[in-house]
Image (spheres, rainbow, N blue to C red):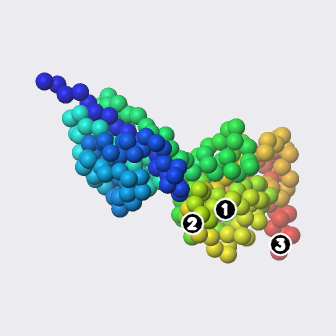
Amino acid sequence: MTVAPGTLVLAGTPIGDIADAPPRLAEELAGADVIAAEDTRRLRRLTQALGVTPKGRVVSYFEGNESARTPDLVDHLLAGARVLLVTDAGMPSVSDPGYRLVAAAVEKDIRVTAVPGPSAVLTALALSGLPVDRFCFEGFLPRKAGERLSRLREVAEERRTLVYFEAPHRLDDTLAAMAEVFGTDRRAAVCRELTKTYEEVRRGPLGELAEWAAEGVRGEITVVVTGAPERAPGELDAAELVRRVRVREEAGERRKEAIAAVAAEAGVPKREVFDAVVAAKNASA
């Protein structure tokens, strides 16, 4: 007799306040055949807070074992199990484990559904005071300075609002890099400890936020940055042209290639960018 495949359920968990738990979350935790949790200790605290006693098997499913454990979970699904995937906070797959399992389940024609829940991305967007009609989520930036600058440079002219996750001990470096690439006057918001007791949303130009963060910041961080303003060709001033060349050079490009790329972006002759770079160099000599 052929067994019908089970169902994979992605469940959103509170990003701070346990009272934000979706009503269906308790039902799924109580009834799942298998619960795959990013941190089984946090899962235990969550079930205790919700007054739930899971009946199913609980397994760990985190970045370090995601690849190895996915086939086993797919086998459970193919055998008819209801597998619940929960991460430490927010929705699975959004900068958290889950994508590999979802992709594997879809490949096997296994039903995938979700229990919608809190999202730091959308919460930060809503609180930022910045445009939210169009946005893109960039996740975590690279840890190495050169790679971080390169990634930021890729979206320097992005018109949509940008959303990032960041670790508190790297926030000052990240905001400084953003100020360098996007400009010190670009508006942004740093959202800290969302829905928790010490929730804070700090809004202002990137230059000011970078100075504030240099003093040290704690907690879970989401950074929202307004998109690049639309500029007509040739509208960029000499200082901005020089800044863009410098950003590209620091990311590893040769000056000649950096000047050509900036000229193409700005819609101006390469000679204009070259002259601006030379003038800036002479002024600082």
Three-letter amino acid code at the position of disc 2: Gly
Side (left or right) of 281 relative to 120? right
Side (left or right) of 267 relative to 88? right
Mark number, residue 224: none
Q: Nearer the viewer, residue 27 or 143?
A: 27
211, above or below 94, in the image: below
Q: Give the residue at x 83% y 65%.
A: 280
**Quadrant where the C terminus is found in the figure:** bottom right
Marks 2, 3: nearer the viewer: 2
Secondary structure beneath label 1: strand
Which callout, 2 or 3, points at the residue further toward the start of the chain?
Answer: 2
- Residue situated furthest left in the rendering: 1
Secondary structure beneath label 3: helix
Q: Give the residue at x 37% y 39%.
A: 9
Give neighbour class at mark 2: few <14, some 14-19, many 20+ (Cα, 10 Å).
Answer: some
Secondary structure beneath label 2: loop
**Given contact means CB atoms under 8 Å apart, are the residues at marks 1 and 2 in contact?**
yes
Side (left or right) of 208 relative to 198? right
Mark number, residue 219: 2
Q: Position of residue 94 (x, y in %)?
A: 49, 47
The answer to whether one can see residue 274 in this image is no
Q: Which residue is mark 1?
A: 200
259, above or below 208, in the image: above
Give neighbour class at mark 1: few <14, some 14-19, many 20+ (Cα, 10 Å).
Answer: some
Quote the CA–CA distance across marks 2 and 3. Answer: 40 Å
The answer to whether one can see residue 86 in this image is yes
Q: Which residue is mark 3?
A: 284
Q: Nearer the viewer, residue 89 or 188?
A: 89
